[in-house]
Amino acid sequence: MSAWNWSLDAAGIREPDLRRDYGAQRESVARFRRTSYLAARLLLPRDVLPHVVAATAVMHHGDNLLDTGPKAQRVAAWASWEQDVRKALDSGMSDDPLIRTLLHTTAAHPRLRQVVEEYLSTAPAELEFAGFATEADYQAYVDAYSLPAFMLVASLLGPDTDAGEFRAGCRIFIDGSQRLDFVNDLAEDLAEGRLGIPTQTLQRFSVTVEDLTDRRQSPGVRDLVKHQVETARASLLAARALPALTANPTGGLMEAVVNIELLTADAALASGPQLLHRSVSPSVVGSLRVMLGARRRAGKQR
């Protein structure tokens, strides 16, 4: 029997059609978030893995609906998906394999329902994203979209009760992770006519949008990129306290997630203004070293 089938058994997922539904989400997550899936497979208890896979698949599907295509298409696609999910949550039934896994995972982890409903209510903020005037606008976006989306998965890793401190730790992490994403994805975002660095910050470094779209490697651009990455890195370093706030033994995965983001920040710092041409990723070897180290430390704590 495969490790995945053992995980389904451990999670009490025995009905054949439902096992196929979860298997489809596993394939989706492994294809589009391979490093994340490998970390989850290595570090999560078997009974938790299928549920985290399902929540990750929901987050990824939502991202695609909100980010892909002309705005009118995205608005219609999201409205249809939101309606389908809300109807399924109320009725307990769905014809959609992804929604069926979400329903089963929500039944196994009832606290997830409130998280899903918050996400559905706030995610349309992504549809209106056209850049930020100020740092305060960026922080509002993190609260409205980035954090609720991250909590779809993180809520399955946190404590069952008194999760306020855990959510605050997640907020610190996602602030750093989202800021890092915006600077790391400069080339792609600029090509799509959007920018995740506030106008206020550009002005601080005497950089214009045209400087970025023209890929000018001026001192101001270099300093801007360095500032954004270092600011993100400071939040990620602060988020190293997050694993201790999770529900053991899921802290190992959170440790790996934070440290892999730090590896990405290091790669972005090394790349500097070359991020205007392409994004960067941490090395496979470095990521594996982080995962294995987290697994070893988690094993010693059990």
Image (spheres, helix red, strand yellow):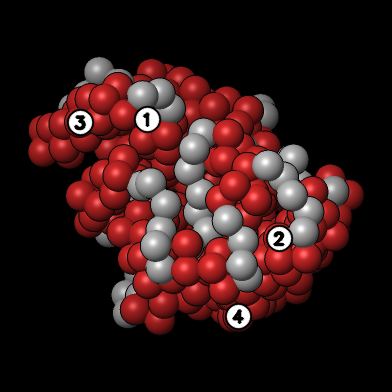
Tell me if 284 is positioned left or right of 249 in this view: right
User: Where the N terminus falls, by quadrant?
Assistant: top right
Relative to 162, say whether 11 is above or below. Answer: above
> Residue at left 55%, top 41%?
189
Quarter of the picture containing the C terminus is bottom right
Element under label 4? helix
- Asked which secondary structure carries label 3, the reply is helix
Q: Amino acid at mark 2?
A: Val
Which numbered circle lies on residue 65? 1
Q: Are marks 2 and 1 in contact (CB under 8 Å)?
A: no
- Of circles 2 and 4, which is in front? 2
**Mark 2 Cα shell of 10 Å, populated few (<14), some (14-19), many (≥20):** many
Report the residue marked by disc 2: 221
* Residue type, mark 4 in image: Ala
- Residue labelled with disc 4: 238
Q: Position of residue 43 (x, y in %)?
A: 66, 55
User: In terms of sequence position, does the residue under pointer 1 or pointer 3 come before the other?
Assistant: 1
Q: Nearer the viewer, residue 168 or 300?
A: 168
